[in-house]
Image (cartoon, grey):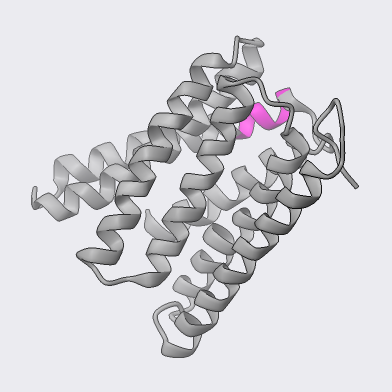
Amino acid sequence: MGDAGLLLSGAALFLNSLMLMGKANAKSVAVFNLFIGAMQVIVPFYLIVASDQNNWTIYSLASIFLFGFTYLYVGMTLLKDLDVSGLGWYSLWVAVLALIYAFVAYVHFEDIVSTLTWLMWAYLWFLFFLSMGMNKKIDAYIGKVAMVQSWLTLTFPALLSMTGLWKTDQVTSAWIYFSIAAFMYFAYITIKLKKTPSRTGEYA
């Protein structure tokens, strides 16, 4: 499931980013979220049951649930016009877990790329909390962050992994620089957002 699931997760986040920027219909995007969410809940559940029950195997597979339930929750919320506060607080919980995964990736696995990736995901989930849990009007800003992450943390890594290039030294080094550049971009648009008064969260 790994690479294929990562690729489709990138597609879901890409569509969500377009929705947040007002370029895609919410209910239309909701349907795709439900498809991907269901897949990322059913498949890892099966893989865990059929696994060797090693703690690190379960730890790794369980991380997929964070995405699966997020997509399901987003899909149902959009489709049924539900109150978003519950999704916002769930996103805060996931953001905390993402920080833990980042810490473990750095300390136990010594994997700087995974560490940076989990930090980016933690930041995105925290933004969802600010938007839906704290009612901050930052949808356009979140859309830009999600757009970058849909390609940098999901789509391209999945494609590179499927072609056997993901673990090469050259790609690993390049991805560290790309990740740092992404964080710099997030800092830049954050400063730009704060300097641009807006009632809607939009900015140039």
Q: Residue at x 55, y 15 (%)?
A: 85
Residue 92 location (% of width, % of height): 45, 31
**Count of marks overlaid on the render:** 0
19 and 4: which is toward the camera: 19
Q: Residue furthest front?
A: 195
Please, is residue 14 above or below residue 31 in the view?
below
- In this picture, which residue range is highlighted in magenta? 27-32
Q: Is residue 101 above or below residue 70?
A: below
Residue 37 visible somewhere in the drawing: yes
**Is 34 or 95 nearer to us in this picture?**
95
| Residue 33 drawn at (x, y percent) | 58, 33
At 53% from the left edge and 23% from the top edge, which residue is drawn?
Answer: 88
Q: Is residue 25 left or right of residue 204?
A: left
Q: Is residue 110 above or below residue 22?
A: below
Dominant secondary structure (helix, strand or loop) of the stretch shown in magenta: helix
Q: What residue appears at the point 65 percent right and 64 percent down from the top-left corner?
A: 184
Q: Is residue 61 left or right of residue 204?
A: left
**Place of residue 164 in the rendered image (x, y in percent of width and height, measured from the top left):** 43, 80
- Please say whether residue 16 is one of the residues in the magenta stretch: no
Q: Residue at x 58, y 37 (%)?
A: 127
Q: Position of residue 156 (x, y in %)?
A: 57, 67
For the residue pair 189 and 16, the one nearer the viewer reads as: 189
Magenta span includes 30? yes
Residue occupying the far right of the picture? 204
- Locate residue 113: give its quadrant: bottom left
* Left or right: 65 in relation to 189: left
Who is closer to the viewer here, 153 or 37? 153
Is residue 40 visible to the viewer in this orientation of the structure? Answer: no
